[in-house]
Image (cartoon, rainbow, N blue to C red):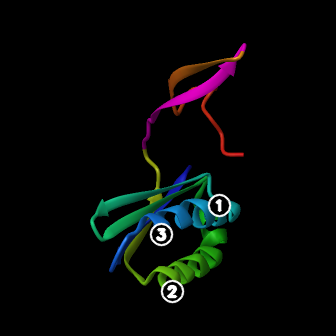
Amino acid sequence: MAFVKVSHWTSTEISDEMISTANEKCIPLIMRVGANGVQMVRTGELSLCVETLFPDASAAQTAQAKIAEIREQLAKDFSMIMVSAHGGAVIGRLFNYIKSNRKGGELTDYTGSSDDENRPHQS
């Protein structure tokens, strides 16, 4: 059963540079420790949460030490404070998304759900 960890953060500022660094460096680091997906959600002018999806609780537990190191580095680099962190088994989900495909030189859109066999995968 999939497992999600959510951490809530505050900062004295959230700049475009911080967001760019998070997308280019932090998210890939989290993915490398066994996560299936990561979302950073801006929840206020100076707050955000990080949602990390793991294949199961065991994978989340295995990644815990590395996640703690990443969190520590984030706090230092961006003067951020982790307000809380929670985790639990996923008991239901459905995502809609648009996936762009190139077919015959044309860019086409495909709309589907998380249960669709054609869903995009992180590479």
Between the residue at mark 2 and the residue at mark 1, the CA separation in whole angstroms equals 18 Å
Which residue does the numbered mark 1 point to in the structure image? 28
Asked whether residue 94 is drawn in magenta, I would say yes
Q: Are marks 3 and 2 in contact (CB under 8 Å)?
A: no
Marked residue nearer the N-terminal end (2 or 1):
1
Q: Are marks 2 and 1 in contact (CB under 8 Å)?
A: no
Q: Is residue 112 above or below residue 91?
A: above
Q: Residue at x 62, y 58 (%)?
A: 35
Helix, strand or loop status at disc 3? helix
Between the residue at mark 3 and the residue at mark 2, the CA separation in whole angstroms equals 12 Å
Residue 48 left/right relative to 102: left
Q: Nearer the viewer, mark 3 or mark 2?
A: 3
Across and down, in percent, residue 68 comes to: 57, 79
Compare residues 115 and 70 and report the one nearer the observer: 70
Q: Nearer the viewer, mark 1 or mark 3?
A: 3
Q: Which mark is residue 76?
A: 2
| The magenta segment | 92-104
Magenta stretch mostly in which secondary structure? strand
Amino acid beneath label 1: Pro
Residue 91 left/right relative to 65: left
Q: Residue at x 60, y 81 (%)?
A: 69
Q: Is residue 78 above or below residue 2?
A: below
Crowding around mark 2 (Cα neighbors within 10 Å: few <14, some 14 to 19, many 20+) is few
Q: Are marks 1 and 3 in contact (CB under 8 Å)?
A: no
Amino acid beneath label 3: Met
